[in-house]
Amino acid sequence: MTIYVDVNAKHDGNGSKQLPFRSINEAAKVAVAGDEVVVVPGIYREYVDPVNPGTEKQRIVYRSEKPLEAVITGAEKITGWSQYNGDVWTAKVKNSVFGDYNPYTTLVYGDWYFATPGKHTGCVWFNDEALYEAASVDECIEAKVYECSWVPEKSKKKWFAKQDKEKDETIFYANFGGADPNNENVEITVRRECFMPSKEGVGYITVSGFNINKAATTWAPPAAYQDGMISPHWSKGWIIEDNEIWGSKCAGICVGRYFDPENSNFYTTRHVKSPTQMERDSVCRGQYYGWLKEKIGGHIIRRNNIHHCEQGGIIGRMGGVFSIIEDNHIHHINNMMELGGAEIAGIKMHAAIDVIMRRNHIHHCTMGIWCDWEAQGTRITQNLLHDNQRPEFAKQLEGGMTCQDIFVEVSHGPTLIDNNVLLSDVSLRIATQGVAMVHNLCAGAFTMVGEGTTWRYTPYHFPHRTEVMGFMTILHGDDRIYNNIFVQKWPSDDLVLLNDSEPDKKYVENRKVGTNLFDEYPTYDEWLKQFDMEEKYPNMMKHDPFHFSHLPVWIDGNAYFEGARSWKNEDNAFVADPGKVNVDLVEKDGKYFLDTNIYEVLKCFEDGMISTDTLGEAFEPSQKYENPDGTPITFDRDYFGNRRGLNILPGPFVSGNAAKEQLSWS
């Protein structure tokens, strides 16, 4: 059955084409498996709470009749502004409009939030641009540039809200930069989510073609309730496609987590247990809450334009397993720099088991892709990442994270990163093990090699399943780095950050490009020799230290330019003299191209074909670098899908001519 919705209908209807519903949520109450909900253009100021699931063969489809012309928003217009002082105006709202969730008394805070608390989940919007939250009316009047912002001029426009408890009102003060708000479109965020089932297990839903914006979402750490403007909410088989998703205070799309009141922000509320321990609990308790391949995950998130969210574009703990994230344009995430903590990225996923992230264009984010814990069977392929780095003029937010294209953290692998173009000043933060880098172009450094994991022993799983197979600390190494191009495009001086609250301490990160950071890591033969493999009766106490030493690495067939340096044991490396190449990203009418002469300098240097057999198994889970269905991979296709023949070059392109094609998928 087709159900119709038209916010501009003259009166309430029954969902027929002649008498459509006026709200999407009315349709969401009655839609059942096999139904399609068609939403005509208009602005739908509502929270959509789907009640019934679809099935694998009969989905429930919510579709904008005209792409992006049906708008689902968590904001309401606010009018009746009166001038308060200079460019600052004031208006009042009765708190009854917020129901049982007031975004202007609810702080963004929770486990793994590191910035100074004080920002609320609500926001004031001026012609679809978010104003910055001030700590007082005086700050609004002063209108100083916020020095951590990536868009400093916009940070002069500010808002402040306070409560009038006697009248049960929220009073807003806002600096609109000289504009009269009564002549402009001014909104405040009112609702917590836009499209998300309130109950778990509402699966097999398609959401297609909507403009979804401006929700007062909460901070979404891995051991807590997680929401996004749109979320499957611990279910299976959603398709989120062809939408524009923007303006979330925290997460745009959330594919996490079951609700567990006994382990939700446990550290923040009770302090006595480490948040890392509560994450381990979260994984094990997940089995109790139905974390199985047959019940959870398997979502498809494709062709969405996700931008201007302040925690993440796509966030999720455990609920996104076995999913495909492809062809999305994710950009300008966390650029206001009002929020800081360990859950911020264009894509931030815990337990991205058998998740494929491909052909995404990710830029101007604090981090591009962050795979935290259990990146087992994760494949990151054919993505374009650039400008995921703090601008030089912006001050580092105290409690904020440093920047990179990809961060893989405390996982045991196998994590496969292949055929990507990584152009920010850090290509990979590698506080982990079991990573394979194959046929990438890296203009930035590796950081955290052998560091950043401390005692955080983490789980690994039975191959292609969620059931836990074991726990182990991170030994580092067990990495494969084949057929990549490394270019020292950015300055090679270490990044040094000082801490205002602890001036005697400083934070240092590597900016030198290349694989020489692995010089202290053994080859496989050197590592294996420690264990006396010929001995019939091994000496356990003798071998005990070696069970906790670095694992071996395999590095070969890479090309190094502009001072990038190779691993000391790399037999087949191409190393060019500095001053020979350039690699720059050029934008033409919203399309992106490479300007480079790398392939002219490479000339006849060739590599071998890399496959699942070449890469072997990740050490701890004993799992191959293979497809989610267990079939092997041969890396005979490049960034564009062109077939590699007999003459195999390092990097993500089959030839210099291929490197000149349009890079951006969006």
Image (tube, grey):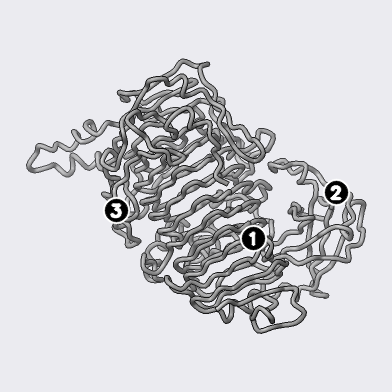
Mark 3 residue type = Gly
Q: How many marks?
A: 3
Residue at horizontal 52 percent and vertical 63 percent from the top: 265
- Of callouts 2 and 3, the N-terminal one: 2
Q: Residues within 10 Å of mark 3 (few under 14, many from 20)?
A: few
Q: Position of residue 137 (x, y in %)?
A: 83, 55
**Between discs 3 and 1, the one toward the N terminus:** 1
Q: Which residue is mark 3?
A: 630
User: Height in image: 567 above or below 541?
Assistant: above
Q: Is residue 193 visible?
A: no
Write down the residue under mark 1: 67
Between tags 3 and 1, which lies in front?
A: 1
Instruction: Tell me the residue that label 2 is attached to.
Output: 177
Q: Residue at x 82, y 52 (%)?
A: 140
Amino acid type at image mark 1: Pro
Does 217 sit above or below residue 494?
below
Nearest to the observer: residue 256 or residue 168: 256
Check the picture and name the quadrant holding the N terminus.
Answer: bottom right
Residue at disc 3, secondary structure: loop
